[in-house]
Image (cartoon, helix red, strand yellow):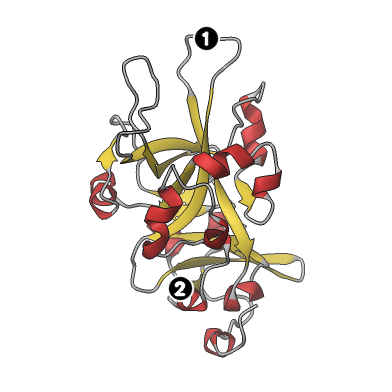
Amino acid sequence: MCGRYAATKNPAKLVQEFEAADETGGHAPSPDHNVAPTKKVLAVVQRHPRDADGQVLEDEPSVRTLRVMRWGLVPFWAKDPSVGNRMINTRSETAHEKPAFRKALARKRCLLPADGWFEWRRNGKEKEPFFMTPRDESTLVMAGIWESWRDPEDADAAPLITCSVLTTDAVGPIADIHHRMPLLLAKDNWASWLDPDREEIGELLAPPSAELVDGLELRPVSSRVNNVRNNGPELLDRAEPATDLDEAALFDAPSK
């Protein structure tokens, strides 16, 4: 699962890395070391352009853009946007069956760039926070879906663009911390995931490879991250866990 993550990269760098046009409109969120549900986040999407009347030009090449969204998906048919508070994560195995997610999974997929995500391991009555992040400090990319919602009682209001993180079974040592994890995408799969004309994506929903997970550091961090009001680079610093996590031994174990 993913209930909190860190995203601190400059939009200009993300535009370059993902070869996307900047459509943040100057509203990109500031670097955030403790991204919580309902916050604004950056997402990469790819869509066909529209004409002056708003009609999709499917014969025109699709365009990749960096946009601002709110974390917590609000289905287009929802009466109240508060439903998004419960839809920050979407199970990849069943998303195609759920009315809230299946349309977005088919046609509105996005990439959610991050520095890493937080997860909590239960230790008796306590929960120990860990930060899962690429060892080489590269951008971690989570598979996401997005939706556009309009207030049925205010036709003139701007649409609310929201997103959700796809999750999957935890792989390798991550399963020692939690049984679920974000669906991570290797760079080779970014284009396929974003392709708005591709509806068959079953192979992209498989858990990330052991090789991709091997490149992650499972870093114990301070319990300060538990409070959403705390936000700063110190939240990503290594802290001593209450119990040992033998990463080397776990990486030698078979992936789950």
The answer to whether the residue labelled 1 contacts the one labelled 2, judged by CB atoms less than 8 Å apart, is no
Q: Could you say which quadrant of the image residue 6 lies in?
A: bottom left
**Whole-percent x and y of residue 54?**
39, 19
Residue 68 - label: none
Q: Nearer the viewer, residue 134 or 75?
A: 75
User: Where the N terminus falls, by quadrant?
Assistant: bottom right
Left or right for 39, reference 92:
left
Residue drawn 62% across and 86% down? 254
Mark 1–mark 2 distance (CA, rounded to whole Å): 45 Å
Q: Could you say which quadrant of the image residue 103 lies in?
A: top right
* Local secondary structure at mark 2: helix
* Local secondary structure at mark 1: loop
Residue farthest front in this picture: 59
Residue drawn 30% across and 39% down? 61
**Whole-percent x and y of residue 149?**
54, 25
Residue drawn 42% across and 48% down? 194
Residue type at tag 1: Ala
Q: Is residue 4 above or below residue 55?
A: below
Q: Is residue 179 above or below residue 167?
A: below
**Whole-percent x and y of residue 172?**
59, 78
User: Where the C terminus falls, by quadrant?
Assistant: bottom right
- Name the residue beneath numbered marker 2: 212
Look at the image and tell me whether residue 39 can be seen: yes
Look at the image and tell me whether residue 231 can be seen: no
Left or right for 219, reference 134:
right
Residue type at tag 2: Leu
Residue farthest right in this picture: 125
**Whole-percent x and y of residue 113?**
40, 53
- Name the residue beneath numbered marker 1: 155
